[in-house]
Amino acid sequence: MNSKQVTGVVLALTMSSVNAFANSPVVSARQDKAVHPVLMRNDFNPIVRIRVRSLEKATFVTSLTFSLAGTDDVNDIDALHVFSTRDKDSFATGMRFGDGTTAKQEITFRGSLRLDQGINVLWLSCRLKRNASLAHRVDAVCTEIKTSEGPIRPYNETPDVSKRIGIALRRHFDDGVHTHRIAVLATTPKGTLLCAYDMRRRASRDLQEDIDIGLLRSTDGGQSWEAQRVIMDMGEYDGLPQEQNGCSDPGILVDPETGEVFVAAVWTWGRPGTHQWSKGGSEPGFEIGKTAQFLMVRSKDDGQTWSQPENLTRKLKHKDWILFAPSPQQGIALPDGTLVMPGQGRDAQDRHFSNLMISRDHGVTWTLSNPASYDNTECQAVRLGDGSIMLNCRTESPTKFRTVAVTSDLGKTWRPHPTNRKGLIEPNCNGSTIRFDYTEDGENKHLLLFANPYSQKARDHHSIRVSFDDGLTWPEESRILLDVGGGRGYPSLSQIDETHVGIVYEGSQSDLVFEKLSLDELLHRAE
């Protein structure tokens, strides 16, 4: 069923709710669906919220019927449940209505729920099968509610919203880890997806804390993922406990010629109660325990095994800088083999900056570019059509627009991009920019993708935007909203193959969410 057919079914159901069933004087209802994915590995995924208004106390709901006509394949669904949250609008699973059921085109839940006077909230929730397709969507519409006052049909306030299927890559307390954050995604020459991230073992807070770098690996385009690997863990280095030996904020880079993968992170040692971006968290110099350290691990077997951490602090950091760290994003390779990895830091005047790490010998040695500009940090580099490099950066407060700079000489000199601090909005959060190369009618083309929380107030409305002119414009009609809810943001994009892109982000439904989008959707082609 295509999107037009689905919309037609939903609209028909909505119109029938108006024409066939008038709400009773005592009971009425409305339904809506928020934009966010339903996730494999989550036991419960809210699909539809129903608000039932009762003008009397002694009123009962005895059944709810749903149509799943808008779902691409009901076989993606393992089970469905209905829950009551009384008068609360937040989803919870404490009070179940009726029995759970397997999916089919039309389902009815029977039970007995006494309504409170006022608003009563009910939810339809689903659990997906482990092999549900990432290309599919789930949708449902409540077509009838039977009450002690007679049958009603809730008005559908969001007829065009359906749920994209994704994966809860990492959840709260998976493998005993409190919180998973700061994911970076990359694709190897063999097509393997690698996702590195913070394993925040005791708490969600940043360094200094007990944090290691974890890695997940997928060899089937993101449909399934191998067990977690720990690729950077400083243990109890020099006798200090794990919480004073944390590694955080990974950056990742794949060399397309050699296949070697590089993951860098910042390590702080012996500075409890500090943060590397705040006063006291890091100082000028090179010594462990005085300044934050720049570590790198490498893999030569497609991410299966990893080297011991190499400390590059003395080779990269200027002695008078307060901090130099990788930017938690994916690096790029230029056509001549040059490797470019984004960096960030605090200079001698404590000005926050973004820059580039550059290697012309496949990662044997690295040099640094000049800062692109100041009062900005986390960034990602992308090669434009004319061969120049655009650096898209998180801007420090109070500016609520992205900092965007361009270089034609690997960062010796920089110039502001026309959209600099006025084109792309942000709530002060990491974002992700990549170039997507594809072929159309035998012609090589490319577009730019940018992902971030599309807001200037909070980390919500997680979105992907598309530019067809190397970032000069980002048409609003091309924005794809993934998750309207709150989360920590920090998206990372990677081109999976010629027709798909993957994204990992910290959304409203899990610590780390993975979704897969097609080129047809990015180009808004009819499917």
Image (cartoon, grey):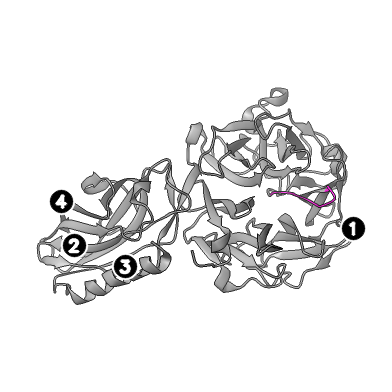
Relative to 315, say whether 378 is above or below: below
Give the magenta part as a residue range.
330-338
Q: Compute the Cα span from label 3 to label 2.
A: 19 Å
Assess whether mark 2 and mark 4 are in contact (beta carbons under 8 angstroms).
no
Q: Residue at x 27, y 45 (%)?
A: 102
Whether residue 514 is visible here, answered yes or no, is yes
Left or right, 69 with respect to 182, comes to: left
The residue identified by callout 1 is 412
The residue identified by callout 2 is 145
Provide the secondary structure element on which disc 3 rests. Answer: helix
Earlier-in-chain disc, 1 versus 3: 3
Residue 454: x and y in percent read: 57, 65
The residue identified by callout 4 is 111
Q: Residues within 10 Å of mark 2 (few under 14, many from 20)?
A: many
Instruction: Please tell me whether residue 23 belongs to the stretch shown in magenta.
Output: no
The front one of 456 and 435 is 435
Q: Amino acid at mark 3?
A: Val
Residue 516: x and y in percent read: 54, 52
Relative to 245, say whether 341 is above or below: below
Q: Residues within 10 Å of mark 4 (few under 14, many from 20)?
A: few
Q: Compute the Cα span from label 1 to label 2.
A: 67 Å
Earlier-in-chain disc, 3 versus 2: 3
Left or right, 480 with respect to 19, comes to: right
Left or right, 81 with respect to 244, comes to: left
- Nearer the viewer's eye, disc 1 or disc 3? 3
